[in-house]
Image (tube, helix red, strand yellow):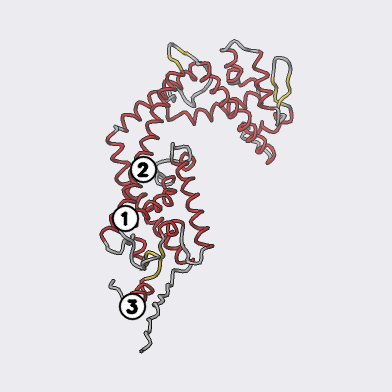
């Protein structure tokens, strides 16, 4: 009786992408989504959003409220304009700098006028003169610029000598004088002015029937609406680009490739069947891509929003932090895994390999591409 020979199962070799190429693909799709989102946000989504909410009208309302609010400071002698009539919202920063200069000049030369001691003026309005000296002591406790009596704060003679050349065209401040002057301006005037404004917001200040807090509430409302508009446009833009790159494009090609995979000639296969991912599994993979690429939402409005303000926009920073955690997890699994899988690959049971390696796999396994 002839011996029955059993055919041994065919072993198929898998040559996954190396760690470096897999990292490049991960970053490639991220930057495609980010750059397309950045472009779409600035040329379409945000301009359209501004049109829908009448952004220019909102800004007119904001500037009018800012002008009325700041008018209280000018009227009460807590802010001085550089020139008569220069009291619009756009002149606030220049006028604050001018007030700072006059404030310091007064402490150097009292003949400039006591009205420029805006903090003394504020506590006079509040009828709380005893708080004046304690206010300066709190500001000065780390720096030692002042000599104090029970009722006055006087700039020390050494600093008077250092700062005096600032207003003398025939003299120049020493390097130490410049450093001390900048410290005095930032730590005494700027911090003191901020504390004064916070106290005003806490207790309100009314001048000729206009309430500081009411105008500040209007300013805050419009600014809040502006931030919400930016955030809404960011999410709309990001989701549209994500849908195109990770759902529409992969659905239209039978191998479920993203734009990054097409540009870098990569293939993704299921680890059990060695065939391209099924459509449902491809959709699941797109959700992991969403989690990893959401980090870019923090920087999409860059250009319309100052860099420092990006981190104060609602929702963007927390979502970016969660995304960063997912990205770090993906890179950890990529670095320690033997098949160079990201977290998404691992959860979807998939491998990524180059087109040449995929063609070899087709020939070796014997199925049609």
Label 3 or label 1, whichever comes before in sequence order: 1
Q: Nearer the viewer, residue 68 or 21?
A: 21
Residue 164 place in picture, x, y as percent: 66, 31
- Residue 176 visible: yes
Q: Nearer the viewer, residue 264 or 41?
A: 264
Residue 306 at x, y = what percent? 45, 41
Mark 1 neighbour density, 10 Å: few (under 14) some (14–19) many (20 or more): few
Distance between the alpha carbons at the discs numbered 3 and 1 = 26 Å
Residue at screen point 49% across, 49% down: 324
**Which of the marked residues, 3 or 2, is nearer the chain's N terminus?**
2
Q: Is residue 133 above or below residue 350?
A: above
- Name the residue tied to disc 2: 235
In the picture, residue 31 is in which quadrant?
bottom left
Q: Position of residue 138 (x, y in %)?
A: 67, 24
In the image, taking residue 287 as reference, residue 120 lies left or right, namely: right
Which of the pair 5/351 is nearer the observer?
5
Q: Are marks 3 and 2 in contact (CB under 8 Å)?
A: no
The residue to which callout 1 is attached is 280
Image position of 174 with respect to 218: above or below: below
Tag 3 near tag 1, CB within 8 Å: no
Q: Is residue 225 left or right of residue 95?
A: left
Note whether residue 245 is visible. no
Secondary structure of residue under mark 1: helix
**Residue at 53% from the left image edge and 62% from the top image edge:** 335
- Pinpoint residue 62: horizontal percent, then vertical percent: 38, 27
Q: Closest to the observer: 358 or 244?
A: 358
Residues under labels 3 and 2: Cα distance?
44 Å
Choose the circle earlier in sequence order: 1 or 2: 2
Query: Disc 3 marks which residue?
Result: 363
CA distance separating discs 1 and 2:
24 Å
Q: Quadrant of the C terminus?
A: bottom left
């Amino acid at each position: 009786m002839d011996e029955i020979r059993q055919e041994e199962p065919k072993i198929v070799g898998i040559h996954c992408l190396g760690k470096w190429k897999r990292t490049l693909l991960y970053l490639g799709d991220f930057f495609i989504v980010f750059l397309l989102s950045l472009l779409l946000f600035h040329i379409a989504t945000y301009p359209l959003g501004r049109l829908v909410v009448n952004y220019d009208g909102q800004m007119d309302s904001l500037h009018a409220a800012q002008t009325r609010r700041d008018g209280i400071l000018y009227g009460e002698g807590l802010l001085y304009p550089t020139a008569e009539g220069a009291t619009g919202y756009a002149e606030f920063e220049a006028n604050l700098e001018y007030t700072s200069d006059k404030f310091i000049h007064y402490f150097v030369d009292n003949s400039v006028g006591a009205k420029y001691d805006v903090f003394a003026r504020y506590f006079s309005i509040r009828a709380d003169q005893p708080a004046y000296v304690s206010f300066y002591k709190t500001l000065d406790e780390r720096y030692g610029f002042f000599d104090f009596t029970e009722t006055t704060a006087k700039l020390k003679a050494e600093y008077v000598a250092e700062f005096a050349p600032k207003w003398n065209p025939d003299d120049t401040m020493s390097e130490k004088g410049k450093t001390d002057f900048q410290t005095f301006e930032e730590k005494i005037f700027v911090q003191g002015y901020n504390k004064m404004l916070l106290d005003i917001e806490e207790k309100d200040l009314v001048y000729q029937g206009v309430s500081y807090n009411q105008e500040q509430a209007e300013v805050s409302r419009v600014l809040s609406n502006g931030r919400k508009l930016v955030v809404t446009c960011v999410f709309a833009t990001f989701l549209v680009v994500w849908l195109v790159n990770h759902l529409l494009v992969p659905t239209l090609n039978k191998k479920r490739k993203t734009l990054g995979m097409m540009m870098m000639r990569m293939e993704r296969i299921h680890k059990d069947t060695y065939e391209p991912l099924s459509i449902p599994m491809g959709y699941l993979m797109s959700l992991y891509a969403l989690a990893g690429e959401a980090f870019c939402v923090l920087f999409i409005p860059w250009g319309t929003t100052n860099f420092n303000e990006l981190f104060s926009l609602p929702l963007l920073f927390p979502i970016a932090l969660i995304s960063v955690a997912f990205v770090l997890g993906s890179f950890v699994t990529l670095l320690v895994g033997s098949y160079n899988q990201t977290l998404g690959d691992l959860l979807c049971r998939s491998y990524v390999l180059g087109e040449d390696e995929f063609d070899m796999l087709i020939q070796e396994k014997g199925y049609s591409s």
